[in-house]
Amino acid sequence: MAQLVVTDMEGNTRTVEAETGISLMEIIRDNDFDDMAALCGGCCSCATCHIYVDEAWASKLGSVDDDEDELLSMAESRQENSRLSCQIEMTDELDGMPVTIAPGE
């Protein structure tokens, strides 16, 4: 099984098992990271699953679509490596990828 390296808002890092084929949001939420609200449940209608993806891994992800970009544009904490974790599906290629939960707005 693949792994995802998650850093919470307090700077604590934990490596978790990451089932392929499901979203990073589900993986983070299901591993009891309280920092991730994920209020819309993965429908891409909020930005409460905002993460920062390690820049070395960005090329392995698909591009940000218009809906995701619009939601991220409202986030004060947006950075170049910002993504909505509900929009990234875990794959074997992403095994070991580090992400950081972005501060809530």
Image: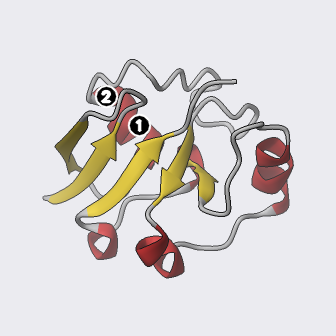
Q: Residue at x 84, y 38 (%)?
A: 74
Disc 1 and disc 2: Cα gap in Å? 6 Å
The numbered disc on residue 89 is none
The residue nearer to you, when weighing 43 against 78, is 78
The residue nearer to you, when weighing 69 against 19, is 69
Outermost residue, left side: 1
Q: Residue at x 33, y 57 (%)?
A: 98
Q: Is residue 31 above or below residue 58?
A: above
Q: Residue at x 85, y 60 (%)?
A: 66
Outermost residue, front side: 11
The numbered disc on residue 26 is 1
Q: Is residue 87 above or below residue 35?
A: below
The residue nearer to you, when weighing 1 against 100, is 100
Outermost residue, bottom side: 59
Left or right, 63 with respect to 75, comes to left
| Residue 77 x/y as whole percent | 69, 40
What amino acid is at disc 1?
Glu
| Residue 49 x/y as whole percent | 57, 35
Left or right, 81 with respect to 44, comes to left
Q: Is residue 99 above or below residue 2?
A: above
Residue annotated with mark 2:
30
Considering the numbered disc 2 on the image, is that residue within a helix, a strand or a loop? Answer: helix
Considering the numbered disc 1 on the image, is that residue within a helix, a strand or a loop? Answer: helix
Is residue 58 visible in the rendered image? The answer is yes
Q: Circles 1 and 2: CB distance less than 8 Å?
A: yes
| Residue 22 x/y as whole percent | 39, 50
Q: Residue at x 33, y 41 (%)?
A: 7
Left or right, 101 with respect to 78, comes to left
Is residue 22 visible in the rendered image? The answer is no
